[in-house]
Structure formats: structure tokens, C-alpha cells
Image (spheres, grey):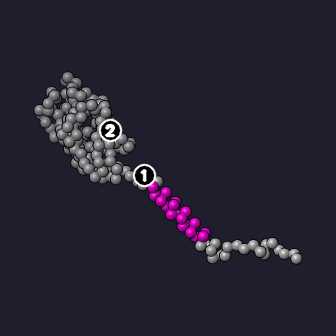
Amino acid sequence: MNRNIAREKRGLSPVIATVILISVTIVVAVSVAYWMGSIASGYTTFEQIELPTSYARWDEDITGFTNGGWNVTIELKNTGSADATIDNIFLNGIPLSGYSSDSIKLYEDGRQVSDLSSISISVTKGGSKTLLIQVEKYNATDNSGIEGCTPGTWVDFKIHSASGRDYPTRVKLP
């Protein structure tokens, strides 16, 4: 008897093979979707600082300023989905630490920031902060105060965050 071995082997029915193939495909697709979702969520959080209010008021009697100066108020509001940290503030392109500490002062929600070279102001998501920057009037006769800060001039402030974003605002000194 000469029998054909191939005829005696049995395989899966096409219906069962199709069900197994579709099940494996669905499991792989769901696994990839969860994996991609976890990767994407790490990149979708962001900070977004808005500066809804910025203005200056003249004050003749700022403590420590011989020429008088301005109280510049800048309100920060974080409308992003992640906390933000302000790590530097620039006045006319120069960091506040580049000015004499006798001519400029920074306050965060009423507390003075003593070291202008290492600013670290946290703004939680959905939160806000108020910055007060006291700027001494420039006096050309004795070269005191902040150069360029005279009545009627515009000054540029740039808020720099730890994530590398810049938020500019412009204030006119009355």
C-alpha cells in the first residue's frame, strides 16, 4: 500500500485561522495604542505664560533710590497644562543681575528676591503671580540709576522660563 503522507495531515480550518489572526491583530493594535498614548502624554504638557497686565507708576520715595523710580507691575498667568518656572528677567535685553542691586529690586507676590542672579519663580498650572520690579530713574549728572529709564520712555521686559520660552512685554514709564 502506497499511501500519501500529505493526505493524512490535518490543518486548521480557515474559519479558526481567521479568528486567531484577527484576535492577534486586535491585541497588538490595542497594545500599540496604549504605548503611543503614554509616549504622547509626556510631550503634550506645556507651559503658557500670559502677561495680562503690565504697567509702571512713579514713586518719589522708593527706599534706597536717591533719584526716585518706578514700580513696574507685571502679572503672570499660567494657562498651560504644566507648571512653569521663571529663571530670568531681562530689562532692555540685559538680565536684572546685570544691573546694580542699588538701582533695581524684584518682588514676587510682595517678597523681595534678594539674589537676582538665581531667580526661581514658580507659577503653577492655572495659577498666577504678580511681579513688582522697582527701577531707579537714570540721572546723567552722577551716572546713577538705570540708563535709559527716564520719564516718557518705553522699556522692554522679557520673562524667561526654565523651559527656554520667552514672554516679552513693553511698559511706558510715566
Q: Nearer the viewer, residue 21 or 16?
A: 16
In percent of width and height, residue 12 lies at 67, 73
**Residue found at the far left of this picture:** 61
Q: Nearer the viewer, residue 24 or 169?
A: 24
Residue drawn at point x = 36 percent, y = 41 percent = 162
Which numbered disc covers residue 18? none
**Res 72 seen here:** no
**Res 13 seen here:** yes
**Residue picked out by circle 2:** 87
Query: Is 25 left, or right, of 55 in this rendering?
Result: right
Q: Indicate which label's residue lies in the foreground, 1 or 2.
A: 1
Q: Quadrant of residue 88?
A: top left
Please tell me how crowded label 2 is: few (under 14), some (14-19), or many (20+) other residues with Cα within 10 Å: some
Badge 2 element: strand
Q: Name the chief secondary structure element in magenta.
A: helix
Residue drawn at point x = 77 percent, y = 74 percent = 8
Query: Is 41 left, or right, of 26 in this rendering?
Result: left
Judge whether 114 appears above or below 28 on screen: above
Tag 2: residue type? Asp
**Residue picked out by circle 1:** 42
> Is 37 covered by the magenta stretch?
yes
Please tell me how crowded label 1 is: few (under 14), some (14-19), or many (20+) other residues with Cα within 10 Å: few
Q: Nearer the viewer, residue 114 or 105?
A: 114
> Is 31 covered by the magenta stretch?
yes
Tag 1: residue type? Gly
Query: Is 4 left, or right, of 32 in this rendering?
Result: right
Tell me the quarter of the image containing the N terminus: bottom right
Judge whether 7 appears above or below 38 on screen: below
In percent of width and height, residue 174 lies at 17, 40
Residue drawn at point x = 31 percent, y = 33 percent = 118
Q: Which residues are magenta?
A: 20-38
